[in-house]
Image (cartoon, rainbow, N blue to C red):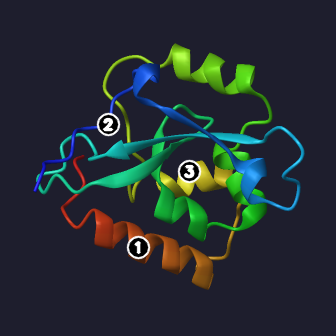
Amino acid sequence: MSVARTITNRYQDFHLLEVGKTTSHPEKRGPFMIVQTGSAPGDPEVRECTFALTRKGTWIHCFIFFLMPKNIRREVAVFETVPETMELAESLTGKPVVETMTSLPSLLQGAGFHPADDDPAVATLMDELKKRHPRKENP
């Protein structure tokens, strides 16, 4: 069994995914996502996951991404053109930041997702994130 590599902010490690090929408009170019497979920096269990690059320049577990409402996914991590994706990808520096229990609500609100405190969609997102990051948050 091989050990997963840690994700990076090097655009050479990214994969451009043309989302349009998986939707109802396969003849059209785009939209696009940037994805990467590996473990989150600092994950003591070195769990391999696939991550999507957000418009904020952070990474989010693809599983969490696909649990979001479709219109919010588009706001969070879907890009209309290749130049738009590459501009963000090439601007990244330093250690990758993966969205956490603390940062995810801010990301979702920034994308226009303002659920009620008792919204089952939010509860599902948070439960799944807890399963993937069971350790305590760093202050």
- Image side of residue 86 versus residue 90, left or right: right
Mark seen at residue 7: 2
Q: Secondary structure at mark 3?
A: helix
Residue bearing the label numbered 1: 128
Q: Secondary structure at mark 2?
A: loop
Callout 2 crowding tier (Cα within 10 Å): few <14, some 14–19, many ≥20: many
- Counting residues from the start of the chain, the first of labels 3 and 2 encountered is 2
- Image side of residue 64 versus residue 75, left or right: left
Cα–Cα gap, marks 1 and 2: 20 Å
Q: Nearer the viewer, mark 1 or mark 2?
A: 2
What's the amino acid at mark 1? Glu
Cα–Cα gap, marks 3 and 2: 22 Å
Callout 3 crowding tier (Cα within 10 Å): few <14, some 14–19, many ≥20: some
Residue visible at 13% across and 50% down in the picture? 2
Q: Nearer the viewer, mark 1 or mark 3?
A: 1
Mark seen at residue 106: 3
Cα–Cα gap, marks 1 and 3: 17 Å
- Residue 112 appears in view: no
Residue visible at 33% across and 70% down in the picture? 130
Q: Are marks 1 and 3 in contact (CB under 8 Å)?
A: no
Residue visible at 89% across and 43% down in the picture? 28
Instruction: Point out residue 84 in the picture as x, y percentages from the top left corner.
Output: 72, 24
Q: For residue 55, what is the image quadrant? A: top right
Instruction: Point out residue 54 in the picture as x, y percentages from the top left corner.
Output: 57, 40
Mark seen at residue 83: none
- Counting residues from the start of the chain, the first of labels 1 and 3 encountered is 3
Relative to 58, is 70 above or below?
below
